Amino acid sequence: MISNFEVHIKNRMTIFLIFFLLSFFPSWLTNNQKETNKDKDSLYVEIQNILKDEFALWYPLTIDILYGGFFSDVNYKWKLEGSQNKMIVTQSRHIWSASNAFEFYENDSSLLNVAEHGFHFLKDKMWDHELGGFYDLVNRQGEPIKEKGRIIKRAYGNAFAIYSLAAYYKISHDTSALRLAKETFNWLEKHSYDPEYGGYFQFISREGIPLKKGYGINPPKDQNSSIHLLECFTELYKVWKDEKLKERLNSMLKIIRDTIVTDKGYMVLFFKSDWVPISYKDSSSELQKRNYVFDHISFGHDVETAYLLLEASDVLGIENDTTTLRIAKKMIDHALKNGWDKENGGLYDGGYYFDAEESSSIIRETKEWWSQAEALNSFLLMSELFPDDEINYFEKFLAQWDYIKKYLIDDKYGGWYWGGIDKEPDHKFTSKVSIWKCNYHTSRSLINCIRRLTKL
């Protein structure tokens, strides 16, 4: 039997031991926390500096003072060269990027001026003032360029126009920008929306006739136009709480999440009008190879769309949306399991499931800049949402940032290469700017990462 004295001594020893441990370990814990904070602080500074360099390189260099809009052809040394045709997608992305950065940098008037400059070119030159809708491609002066003798408009391009107009309205309060965004939305409703099966036809004639069987060899519906319609409706709904818009945004979220995303966690790329997938899985290997462009896994689009789905759900105000969260996580996990380069880091551009394979094979080992930027953003987002997950998304985020610094950012001339030079060294000498390449993916990713690191 233990005496009261022994209990007293044991209690005193326990108190002493606790006091000793508390006096010793806080210094270790504090130092460890300082080290973690130091790592995040250095990351924060690195990403801030890259973002600052991004905008310094792009503006005012790409601003076309003479004809309006933005230059589209800049070589690897950041020198203007080429025809400078202007595409609605790129022109719109410039406006959105400048508007988004204006908010981030807390009202930098120079960025507002960049966005305003781009807005006037969209409104005055790229909008079809006779028949409505935005032209897809114009020359430097703003005159429409025909494709095989005709003018084709695209839901994809008009989606980016809405995206930029909504963002510009948010920072400028220019009601003409919001009015044009609404007009574009209504034009898509009238000429691109499919009331029978939902979603939107990608190709529309200049006169506004949807090409329900597709255009050339291209099917009528696809994931790429769908995810960017989701994206633009999300942006527009932030500034225009319209019930029809809300209905369409919710519809696109469900189509992408429940139809376009497969059970494995990747997206089908192309569809017939009734959302039957375009697939060559039961075809010969030769036919499969010839049609990879229509039927493969795009890991970059998957990680980007995971973010866009969560953003749309948040803007819609859907409470406890565990379904969208589960699907978004599945998409990121699938990309990491099947498309992640375990040796150098980075996501491969393309994969494919052959026969009954459990894991996909890599059919495109290249790593384009935009998919690496989107992966950086989505990995950090997942680390915030699932900090204790066994995948360790923050570790993948760090590895992705190391990959970008080593293989994608040009430490001689600045900016991002078209693709990772671990796989394509010649990208050191390819154009820094084209009608398909501007600062939208990179600046959005970097700004989102800085904001999340600030919270962390």
Image (cartoon, helix red, strand yellow):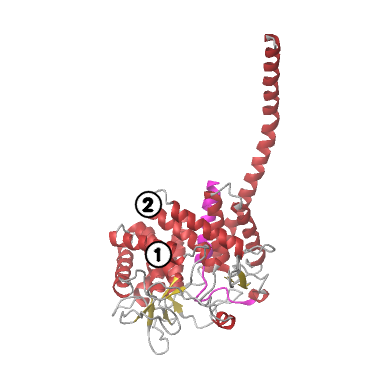
Q: Residue furthest bottom?
A: 149
Residue at the (46%, 81%) spot, across then down? 85
Callout count: 2
Residue 263 position (above or below residue 191) = above
Residue at the (44%, 54%) spot, across then down? 323
x%, y% of residue 12?
A: 69, 16
Residue at the (50%, 74%) spot, across then down? 436
Name the amino acid type tagged 1.
Ile
Name the amino acid type tagged 2.
Gly
Q: Quadrant of the N terminus?
A: top right
Residue 84 position (above or below residue 448) = below
Label 1: element kind: helix
Q: Which residue is mark 1?
A: 255
121 sits left or right of 4 in the view: left
Residue 444 belongs to magenta span: yes
Question: Is residue 377 visible to the viewer in this orientation of the structure?
Answer: no
Q: Which residue is mark 2?
A: 317
In the image, the segment drawn in magenta is: 429-456
**Which is nearer the N-term, disc 1 or disc 2?**
1
Label 2: element kind: loop
x%, y% of residue 78?
A: 58, 73
Residue closest to the eye, 387 or 174: 387
Tell me the number on the disc at residue 418.
Answer: none
Disc 1 to disc 2, how far (Cα)? 18 Å
Tell me the crowding category of disc 1: few under 14, some 14 to 19, or many 20 or more residues within 10 angstroms, Cα based. Answer: some
Residue 41 position (above or below residue 157) = above
Residue at the (53%, 51%) spot, across then down? 452
x%, y% of residue 340?
A: 62, 63
Q: Magenta residues: mostly which secondary structure?
A: helix
Residue 65 falls in which quadrant of the image? bottom left
Tell me the crowding category of disc 2: few under 14, some 14 to 19, or many 20 or more residues within 10 angstroms, Cα based. Answer: few
Residue 344 belongs to magenta span: no
